[in-house]
Image (tube, coloured by chain):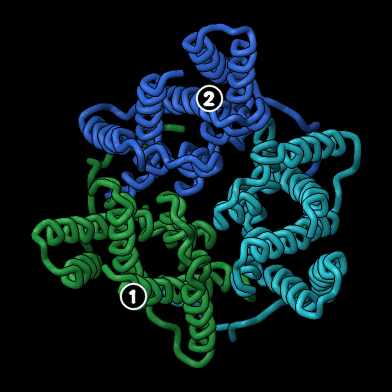
Chain colours: A green, B cyan, C blue
Amino acid sequence: MSTEYFIVLGVVGVAFFAVSGALLGHDKSINGFGIVVVGVMTALGGGTLRDLLLGKPIFWVETSEYLLATYSAIFATVLFIRYMPSPSNFYFILIDTIGLAIFNVIGIEKALISGTGMIVALTMGMTTGIFGGLMRDVVCREVPYVMRGDVYASACFAGGLTYAALFALDIPYIWCILGSISVTVLMRIASLHWGVKVDLFRKRTPRPN
Amino acid sequence: MSTEYFIVLGVVGVAFFAVSGALLGHDKSINGFGIVVVGVMTALGGGTLRDLLLGKPIFWVETSEYLLATYSAIFATVLFIRYMPSPSNFYFILIDTIGLAIFNVIGIEKALISGTGMIVALTMGMTTGIFGGLMRDVVCREVPYVMRGDVYASACFAGGLTYAALFALDIPYIWCILGSISVTVLMRIASLHWGVKVDLFRKRTPRPN
Amino acid sequence: MSTEYFIVLGVVGVAFFAVSGALLGHDKSINGFGIVVVGVMTALGGGTLRDLLLGKPIFWVETSEYLLATYSAIFATVLFIRYMPSPSNFYFILIDTIGLAIFNVIGIEKALISGTGMIVALTMGMTTGIFGGLMRDVVCREVPYVMRGDVYASACFAGGLTYAALFALDIPYIWCILGSISVTVLMRIASLHWGVKVDLFRKRTPRPN
């Protein structure tokens, strides 16, 4: 994938996550600059961890467009909310999921370019996608989305497998990317629509502690 | 700024944050070595993240004086609390704010020395200042200070702008530093005294979730 | 210590922590792939932070056996829990403690090999041992073990001192390792059995906030 693709996709992903962070912060009545802190953390957290793990320079330190996109998206969200009705929970999840899907793909690509194997690359994609939202939820004292048994990490993983499969078939990059993003987004939205939950465990009474 | 300045200022900042971590831990009846863990995390968390982001060696791995200052401040706090009346919340906030102001300046300086632009440098200053206290609050299961709508991140940001302005005017380093620290500390203390809150959002009823 | 030792010990430690993460996740009725996320975070969090701090390549990015061991241990736990009675809290703590003791030793060794002094090495051992479990507890919204006043961080520290003492006496590596692990595990188990708590602070009424 050429560098321009990376940056455009990355800027879009960063903006989506920044909006999701600002929205959740608003919801939890975090105010003032705390919103900016949550937004920045959500937008940049996953990619920062990915770059640290791969031993690469951090993307937003090197290319400050990401930082500008983050701040702009946060301020746009703050302005929007003042003059618009509160967005429904569906839009929040949609925004969060698009960010997840995009970051997943970027994480996988960056790992593969660094020469890791596919299992490390898929882990890196999930890290990039999940970690920012996880920090957002922890800091806002929410039960993290990824822990609620929804189709979240599994949608991310399915998107990763799609990417790996299309990649193995020598499909052009742009279709690997679009295929992976579509699978993640559709799987998450469909599962919410039909109320699907992933049950790895047969339920039991909890251990005493 | 010469290296000695850096180290002296850094050691002072680290000690302040270590004390704030130990005090909050005490408050939340964390006991035993947990206090040491909270103190270390508060004192070293922000600077560690900054060095990771800038791709520099971690300050306390390279210069173990920081680690000694941290441990000493924690043990001094533990001793003090046994024989002194509990400090009031005001002192806690003052200590936390001085740490914030110092780390903000150090973060900005280190980023500028690494050759980043001013927008990345201001972000790095806030990261250095805020992250340790944020980890402390998350681990102690407090609502993070930075999320409460107080003048916290905004005081930090104002301190950063002060630094940037004095720096652009070619004022000697020592005055840039002192100016920035004073602005952050005074803004936070004044806002607490007059009960100022930052309201970026017009309040609305929360979205259902 | 030879590289094979490192890897064998590391793989065992990673597997223990992965199991502990999956068990706690099960307990807190986290379901679906969230379990995998918690397990991975617990198993790899501490070592990842250590490698970042030491400026080394991340162990599981370089040697993907660790990642395979982590996923295998998580899936084995998921299968086990379906067909076995819930393990008691004692087994959970035992598994967690063995992981802690092993990671402590590995952290100290890796730091010493990197040429740090003993005080940095002991801190690095505690970081490696404690951080993964701390992330697990934060994400599962538990009071972190390390904060409960149990003999936890202190058992880890005692294990570190044991290692340092045996190392200074030129005892062969294998005994340094086994000695340190035994001290940590026995100290934690004994303290639970006799209900020992570490009280650094004389108790006081909490500060108002």
Under circle 1, the secondary element is helix
Residue C2 image position (x, y, % from top left) = 42, 19
Q: Quadrant of the C terminus of chain B?
A: bottom left
Image coords of residue C195 (percent x, y): 61, 20
Residue sticking out furthest to the left:
A169
Identify the amino acid type marked 1.
Answer: Glu
Residue assigned mark 2: C109
Q: Is residue A155 above or below residue C89?
A: below
Out of B47 and B74, give the one closest to the viewer.
B47
Q: Nearer the viewer, residue B21 or B206?
A: B21
Q: Residue furthest bottom?
A: A83
Q: Tell me the quadrant of the picture where the N terminus of chain B can be found.
A: bottom right
* One can see residue C207 in this view: no
Amino acid under disc 2: Glu
Residue B120 seen in this snapshot: yes
Indicate the quadrant where residue A49 lies: bottom left
Picture coordinates of residue A131, whole percent (x, y): 42, 57
The dot on residue A75 is none
Q: Return the residue at label 1.
A: A4
Q: Is residue A118 above or below residue C47?
A: below
